[in-house]
Image: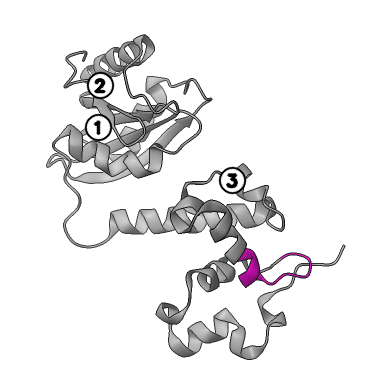
Amino acid sequence: MAEGLVIRDLPANERPRERMEQYGPEALSTAELLAIVLRVGSRGESAVRLAERLLSEFGGLAGIARARVPQLSALTGMGLAKAAQLKAAFELGKRLAMSAEGPKPVVSTAHEAAKLVMEDLRYRQQECLAAIFLDTRNQVICVRTITVGTLTGSPAHPREIFREALAQGCAHLIVCHNHPSGDPSPSRDDISLTTRLVQVGELMGIPVLDHIIIGDGKYVSVKEAGKM
């Protein structure tokens, strides 16, 4: 099987790496920047053209960022390696944004917590449980996805959440998860999980401040609903 076209196969004036070197990354299109990450195209197709197809297929950069590795790798010309490269690049960008110098985001209300995770969780096709780890000033240390489950559930155990809480050295945390159905109404299992997490948090001295359930553009705070 013929190998995919690499960036060096393009005419010199169309090579994203050379254009970046000459003009800087700001001068490159989104497709060209993605092509540098992908490095290799597919049979008879440059990396730039593959990047353009990715943007079209997933509805832009935000859609690519939300897509899971299996979805990305299923696109003709992609495969697991390229999909993993893209997801790694997006994750690095997220971590850089969280660690950037200057004031860290402060989360002191359910609305602020929901806003922080809404765009990441609302389009997920599987239930994902994430946690917002906060310092003593309610400043965000980081947001981490803890478990990824199925269409109807995300198996979670307090040890996974609090293992990460200890690793991050947080003072308290907020648990978040999505409902792929789009309806954020808490289920009986959601309330049960919240109760367990609150109890463990009290024992460990890392209080759980809230449990935010994300739907399609809306959310429910278990605490504000009086079920915590």
Above or below, comparing residue 212 to residue 84 in the picture: above
The residue singled out by tag 3 in the image is: 69
> Of the residues under marks 3 and 2, which one precedes in the sequence?
3
In the image, what residue occupies the spot 72% across and 69% down?
Answer: 45
The residue singled out by tag 1 in the image is: 173
How far apart marks 1 and 2 lie (CA) works out to 9 Å
Look at discs 1 and 2 and give the one toward the viewer: 1
In this view, the residue in front, 166 or 43, is 43
Look at discs 3 and 2 and give the one toward the viewer: 3
Is residue 211 visible in the rendered image? The answer is: no
The reply to whether dot 1 and dot 2 touch (C-beta < 8 Å) is yes
Is residue 79 visible in the rendered image? The answer is: yes
Q: Quadrant of residue 213?
A: top left
How far apart marks 3 and 2 lie (CA) works out to 33 Å
In this view, the residue in front, 203 or 63, is 63
Q: Name the secondary structure under disc 3.
A: helix
Q: Position of residue 185 (x, y in %)?
A: 31, 19
Q: Which residues are magenta?
A: 42-51
Classed neighbour count for the residue bearing mark 1: other residues with Cα under 10 Å, few (<14), some (14–19), many (≥20): many
Q: Position of residue 183 (x, y in %)?
A: 36, 24
Please state which amino acid type lies under the numbered disc 2: Gly
Does the segment drawn in magenta span residue 48? Answer: yes
Please state which amino acid type lies under the numbered disc 3: Val
